[in-house]
Amino acid sequence: MLSVDEALQQVLSRAKPKPPAACSIHDALGLVLGEEIRSDVDSPPHDKSLVDGYAVIAEDLALGQAELEVLEEITAGAVPTRTLGRGQTARIMTGAPVPSGADAVVMVEDSRPLAAGGALGRVRIATRRVVAGQNIMRRAASMAKGDVVLRAGRELRSVEIGVLAEVGRTQPRVVPRPTVAVLPTGNELVSPRQVPTPGQVRNSNGPMLLAAARSAGAEAVDLGIARDEPQQLRELIGRGLECDVLVISGGVSAGVLDLVPGVLEELRVERIFHKVSLKPGKPLWFGVSARGGDDTLVFGLPGNPVSSLVCFELFVRPAIGRLAARGDTSLVEVTADLAIDHSQRGDHPTYYPATLKTTLGRSLIEPLRWQGSGDLRSLVEANALACFPPGDRTYRSGETIRALQLQR
Ligand code: AMP
Ligand code: MG
């Protein structure tokens, strides 16, 4: 049986980044840039004032004191019409272009308008030393026209979206969001809106896996619930094969109604592996379906909710990250000391829900009380999975073990 690492390698080797396509910056948050971006403007576009105050000739204020003639008032968005000479100034606002002749700006707090004289009167300035360039941001100091401001491969956060807007690139080429279809299967499943009758359970995996797919950066597609019935499975799986990824839950184990692997093979989905040495999640099925030039990655996750979620985190999340060209999005592995004794038994590596705390540089991990792969509720408190190798043994408090951090 494949190990978790071998299975993940198999999955990742089939997950190829999608080709870049144009996308509005309003929809591009979290996506990866697919092209180099150059500025089409100087920023700032002119020598600009960084404060509200008076544009001056620094030499006029060599002593810090002067009485100056005010030529005009320049607000942001306006263009200066006068050139300053000795003894002259212009009232100027933050962001406005500095008039020619001026080489510094004094803050308004250091000024006092005097009555009469000239169109805008006179002003008295009393300040500390004024140096040339003070409170001025030079044209193109941030970026010059033609500069490369963002490189291909960068993940777009709000700051990059702002830079794209600044250089007028409202439709950059990005690696598109992978589409992920989710199909829960099982005759016992009813909608979460319903009260289950005897024998029924609510479909918790559907909403959970749709949310997980979205949290991994995918566009999630809800296929509804499939009964354990070949015709309906064929039809809904067929629809899911139009997406980049199809995530099926349930029906992949050894029960008499576990029909999913058979239907997938009928639909010519190439099986890459079935079963991984892992608890919870051993029955995991993975295959690839050819769809024109593109492939659909197909995951059959075991139906028990914790198995489904653990398999999603270990295999589906990194695959979505790879399709989106986001590099390694696997869960982060850490080492931590056990906070309590823990008895572990079984033939497969176990990923056990746990709380991980780091205080004063020491990480402590505490396995939670957990009733197994059907006990989703206990996972609510977990922020990590404690990793125990196969075999029966009691681990002692203080022993160092491996753990995977769950995403927040
Ligand atoms: P299966 O993998 O189909 O054999 O299902 C294993 C267990 O998981 C059974 O107890 C199912 O009732 C349960 N299960 C399967 N699918 C879901 C689902 N979508 N939501 C909640 N529980 C499920
Ligand atoms: Mg089932």
Image: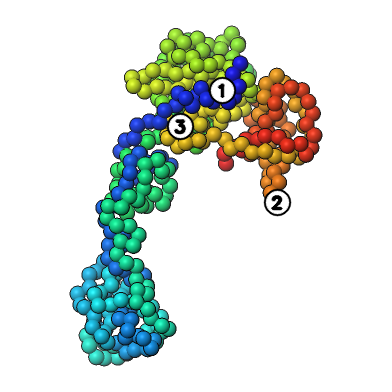
Camera-side residue of 239 and 241: 241
Q: Earlier in the sequence, mark 3 or mark 1?
A: 1
Which residue sits at x=70%, y=28%? 388
Q: Amino acid at mark 3?
A: Arg
Disc 2 to disc 3, C-alpha distance: 35 Å
Q: Earlier in the sequence, mark 2 or mark 3?
A: 3
Q: Which mark is residue 260?
A: none
Disc 2 to disc 1, C-alpha distance: 35 Å
Q: Which mark is residue 360?
A: 2
Which residue sits at x=66%, y=29%? 351
The secondary element bearing badge 3 is classed as: helix
Left or right: residue 66 compared with residue 271: left
Q: Which residue is mark 3?
A: 322
Snapshot quadrant of residue 201: top right
Can residue 254 be seen from the camera position used here? yes
Q: Amino acid at mark 2?
A: Leu
Can residue 227 be seen from the camera position used here? no
Which residue sits at x=47%, y=25%? 13
Mark 3 neighbour class, 10 Å CA radius: few under 14, some 14 to 19, many 20 or more = many
Point out residue 104 in the picture as x, y percentages from the top left corner: 33, 76
Snapshot quadrant of residue 58: bottom left
